[in-house]
Structures are given as C-alpha cells and as structure tokens.
Image: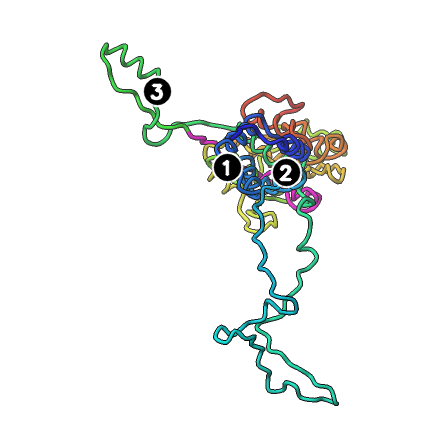
C-alpha cells in the first residue's frame, strides 16, 4: 500500500490555513504514516475521524477540521449500500405479511367500526402498528460545510502556544530520570562502574492569576476574552490558574483627594502624585463573569503563593474613548497592589491601539506594560514580559 498522502490533503491544508488553523510538515507526515499503517481507508467517515484525531487538540478545533474536510474533493470511500430486497410479482405488495402455514396473504383484521356505511359511503379503518412518522425540520438537513466557526484575532492554538512559554520548571516527585552529568561525575570520582544518578521529572510550577474586566464596555469582547481564558485554562499547563472578574476597577482608592493637588485640573498626568498613591487596601473581585461569588481582593492576594506574574484584561475605557481621572487613580492603586503581591504584571487590551490615546487606557499604558489583543504579536510580547524581558514604560509605578 502506498504511503503517499492523497491529493486532497493540499486542498484540506489550504482550507484550514484560511481559518487560522496552521498545520506543519510534521502534521502531514503523521497523516501519511497513519495511512501507510492502514488507518482511514475503510470509509470517508473513517478518514475524516483520522484527520480529526491527528490534528485537532480540542472540540472547537475538531469542528474546524470537519467543516474544512467537507469543502474539499475527498474520494468517496464509503462501502456500497446493502442491496434492496427484491419486490414480488407485479401487483403484489412485498410488505404485506403472509401466513406461513397456508402461504396466503393475511389482511389486517378490521376494527369494530370497519365497513360501516356513513351517509351511503363505506368507511374502512385500518389498525396502525405505531405512531405516524414525524417529518424532520428543515434545519436538520443543513449543509455541514457551512458551519460557522468563530474566527478571532488569536486562535486557540496560537494562544496555547504563547501561554506555554510561561514556565517555571522544578523537579518534584520520585526519581525517574537519569542525570547524565552527575552520573559521569560520580563514575569519574570513584573510578569504578556505578549505577546512574536518578532525579525527579520536571514539571511546570508556574502559577498565574488573571483579572478580567466584565460587563459594560467589555461586553462586546466577552466571547473573545472567554476564548482566550479557556485556551489558558485547558492548554497552558500551569500548576495553578486563578481567574477573577471585576467591573472597571475592583475598589475605590482612599487617595482620591490627591487629584485636587494636581497642576493639571483634568488630571491627564498623575506623575506628580504617582508616588503618593498607595496600593489598593481593599477591593472586591468575583469568581464568575456575571459578577457573582464575591471575594475580598486582599484575601485573594494572600492565598496565591509563588506566582509567575499577573495578567489584567480590560479595555480601560478605550472602547468608549473616555478619559476618567478618578478611574485612572483607582486603577493605579489596584495595579500597585498586584505589583506588590505578584511582581511582574502585564495588561492585555482587546481594543485597537489607536483608540488608547484619548482614553484612560493611554494613561494606564504609561505606567504598566500594555499590549493589544487584536493581534498575535501583542500576546507574544506580553508572554515575553511575563518571562522576564524588560519592557520600557514612560512612568513606571
């Protein structure tokens, strides 16, 4: 059996790339090897299932592969249908039951009201063996090739690949791996053959708290943010992920009166009082995007140990294009509390960069690293900042 991939594979890969589902040469090689081993040849459905098993890493990705599979010219590998039962002689109903003893047709027994004349017309009633068939709605015959798959600026696979780069490897558990350098060193020191030096396996001990602005101007971005959160939770492979929600800001700063001392009455730059703004002493976050399940921010910060940084996802007023000095001051107090608890801090903004300047977001970006979620490069740069790469801001906290 030939191990070459069928000709339709190139068209299938092109369909997937149009949907942001990029496959590499190793993925095509995996399909070719599976076909060479005899998988996927029994039917068209088996071939589709093979592609899904090899390439899809989640249920949404499986839907993308299935939708693309139906849009290419795939050879029909379905086995032939079973031959129909031949009909009897002309004029004989093949579905009519017969009497096996006499070989005669057995007509249904009439009911008690059969053949009763009504108004001079005979009415015949026949007994039904079951309920009449129910016609399926038109939506059941929808073309699966037209399944609408959500297309976001950053796909689930791209988000997973970015988040997985946030790692803090530690060795924990029983010794199962060989430390080659330690084994060679021990043998060199002792001068005799010794057993290998075993060490525990590495695992990712990264802990990531994520704070998401929900409701209000963030409502149009809710599905996209949930898409990224799900990719972070299901594929990032962190030791612990803590997701909490807030609306605009988690709480009010006790230093709002400092705005009265600014030389700029509009408070467009709070650099004069930046050092006097204290971390938010108290606030409230929630466990669900519907802002239910309240929790004190201070209690949460005390329970998260050894984090690898913190992530804030919010438009910071850029969606409506508003600037609010009070919100800016409250946000700075919130960010100072996160900085003191978690160290590294990044802000992800789902709006376009050109909308930041005339809003609170542009002022917040002067104090913490802010990156756009409208492109994959923004997420990549945010991950680099969480990994320790220095990011220049105009007025750091």
Secondary structure of the residue carrying tag 1 is: loop
* Residue 121 visible within the image: yes
- The 10 Å Cα crowd at callout 1, few under 14, some 14 to 19, many 20 or more, is some
Name the quadrant containing residue 25.
top right
Q: Nearer the viewer, residue 198 or 222?
A: 198
Magenta stretch contains residue 205? yes
Q: Which residues are magenta?
A: 203-229
- Residue 125 image point, x, y percent: 64, 81
In the picture of the structure, the residue carrying the numbered disc 3 is 179
Secondary structure beneath disc 3? loop
Using the rendered view, name the quadrant where residue 92 is placed. bottom right
SS state under label 2: loop
Q: Quadrant of residue 4?
A: top right
Q: Is residue 307 magenta?
A: no
> Marks 3/2: CA distance?
49 Å
Q: Position of residue 254 (x, y in %)?
A: 61, 40
């Amino acid at each position: 059996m030939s191990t070459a991939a069928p000709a339709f594979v190139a068209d299938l890969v092109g369909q997937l790339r149009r949907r942001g589902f990029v496959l590499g040469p190793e993925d095509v090689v995996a399909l070719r090897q599976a076909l060479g081993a005899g998988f996927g040849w029994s039917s068209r459905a088996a071939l589709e299932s093979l592609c899904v098993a090899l390439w899809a890493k989640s249920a949404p990705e499986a839907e993308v592969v299935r939708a693309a599979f139906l849009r290419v010219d795939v050879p029909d590998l379905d086995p032939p249908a079973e031959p129909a039962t031949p009909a009897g002689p002309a004029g004989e109903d093949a579905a009519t039951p017969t009497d096996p003893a006499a070989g005669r047709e057995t007509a249904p027994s009439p009911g008690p009201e059969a053949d009763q004349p009504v108004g001079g017309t005979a009415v015949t009633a026949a007994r039904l063996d079951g309920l009449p068939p129910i016609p399926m709605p038109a939506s059941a015959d929808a073309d699966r090739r037209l399944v609408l798959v959500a297309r976001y600026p950053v796909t689930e696979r791209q988000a997973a690949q970015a988040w997985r780069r946030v790692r803090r490897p530690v060795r924990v558990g029983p010794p199962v791996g060989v430390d080659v350098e330690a084994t060679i060193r021990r043998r060199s020191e002792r001068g005799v053959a010794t057993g290998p030096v075993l060490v525990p396996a590495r695992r990712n001990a990264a802990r990531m708290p994520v704070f998401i602005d929900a409701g209000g101007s963030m409502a149009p971005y809710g599905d996209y943010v949930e898409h990224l959160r799900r990719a972070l939770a299901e594929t990032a492979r962190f030791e612990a992920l803590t997701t909490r929600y807030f609306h605009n800001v988690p709480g009010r700063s006790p230093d709002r009166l400092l705005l009265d001392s600014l030389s700029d009455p509009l408070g467009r730059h709070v650099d004069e009082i930046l050092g006097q703004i204290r971390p938010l002493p108290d606030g409230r976050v929630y466990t669900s995007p519907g802002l239910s399940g309240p929790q004190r921010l201070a209690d949460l910060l005390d329970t998260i140990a050894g984090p690898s940084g913190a992530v804030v996802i919010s438009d910071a007023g850029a969606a409506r294009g508003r600037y609010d000095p009070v919100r800016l001051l409250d946000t700075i107090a919130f960010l100072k509390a996160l900085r003191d608890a978690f160290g590294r801090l990044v802000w992800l903004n789902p709006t376009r960069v050109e909308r930041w300047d005339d809003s609170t977001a542009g002022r917040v970006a002067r104090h913490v690293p802010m990156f756009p979620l409208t492109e994959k490069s923004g997420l990549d740069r945010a991950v680099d900042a969480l990994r320790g790469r220095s990011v220049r801001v105009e007025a750091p906290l």
